[in-house]
Image: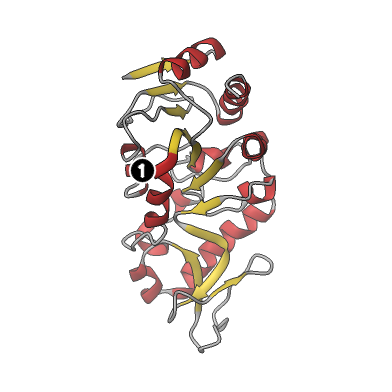
Amino acid sequence: MYISENSAEGLHNFLSKAQFTTSRSIIVFTGAGMSAESGISTFRDKGGLWEEHDIEEVATPQAWSRDREKVLDFYNMRRKQLLEVEPNKGHQIIAKMEKDFNLKVITQNIDDLHERAGSKKVLHLHGELRKSRSSLDENLIYPIEGSELKIGDKCEKGSQLRPHVVWFGEMVPAMDEAIDQLEDCGLMIVVGSSLMVYPAASLVQMVETDCPVIVIDPDEVVAHAAGPLLHLACGASEGLEMLHSVLKSFW
């Protein structure tokens, strides 16, 4: 069942018909559109950071092997941008929702805006921009002070530090933990994700058939879920504010 809606009444009716209950957990699954309202360039933005760089040149293991300095410069630029922005209203609403409900965040984003807004239960599928890790031992992870990671910055075993992010073509280590979190999921809320990047996008298809899925996005979405699905055709902050208000009426 796919429904497009943009009103609190319609949202309430959808959840009522889906027999939503606060006794189960809520998973908020966020993508690049979640942070766009903070000024973070998204993957497909015209004029955005990614447009000026071929993915193969900055976000693959092959790129790292070929030109480490170029890869580091690219992520330094993204890190510098991150340090110049703040969490938006949508991030703050999610943090408030965590206090009201048994809520967890699974994000495709590598920024730390959820944490800076106050969210405590955040699982980063694709790594974290403000951390580095050993290129020899992936278990050696370090915070990055400031915006730069440079050639010559090494781990305790003597290997060059690399961005703690999942590059295209690499495994997503956090997928197993994300799948485990779906076991008690009674509602999945998707915010700002095109649901085009796999394997992360497959999580929407792994929820139980009685678990409603709400996708918040101003544009038309192509999404497939195991259970009932509603599209809130609005921006992240607007949709989350409406949703938070409606959810509180079920408590």
In the figure, residue 226 lies in which quadrant?
Answer: top left
Crowding at label 1, few (<14), some or many (≥20) Cα neighbours within 10 Å? Answer: some
Residue drawn at (36%, 69%) of the image: 61
Give the image location of residue 101, x and y in percent.
60, 35
Give the quadrant of the N terminus. top left
Give the quadrant of the C terminus. top right
Label 1: which residue? 203
Q: Is residue 218 above or below residue 76?
A: above
Residue nearest the viewer, comparing 132 with 29? 29
Give the image location of residue 202, x and y in percent.
32, 43
In the figure, residue 240 lies in which quadrant?
Answer: top right
Residue nearest the viewer, comparing 182 with 113? 182
Give the image location of residue 128, x and y in percent.
54, 60
Give the image location of residue 197, x and y in percent.
35, 46
Q: Is residue 144 rendered to the left or right of residue 229?
A: right
Residue drawn at (63%, 25%) of the image: 241
- Give amino acid for label 1: Leu
Residue drawn at (51%, 62%) of the image: 74
Q: Is residue 176 above or below residue 196?
A: below
Colour treatment of the image: secondary structure
Residue nearest the viewer, comparing 126 with 21? 21
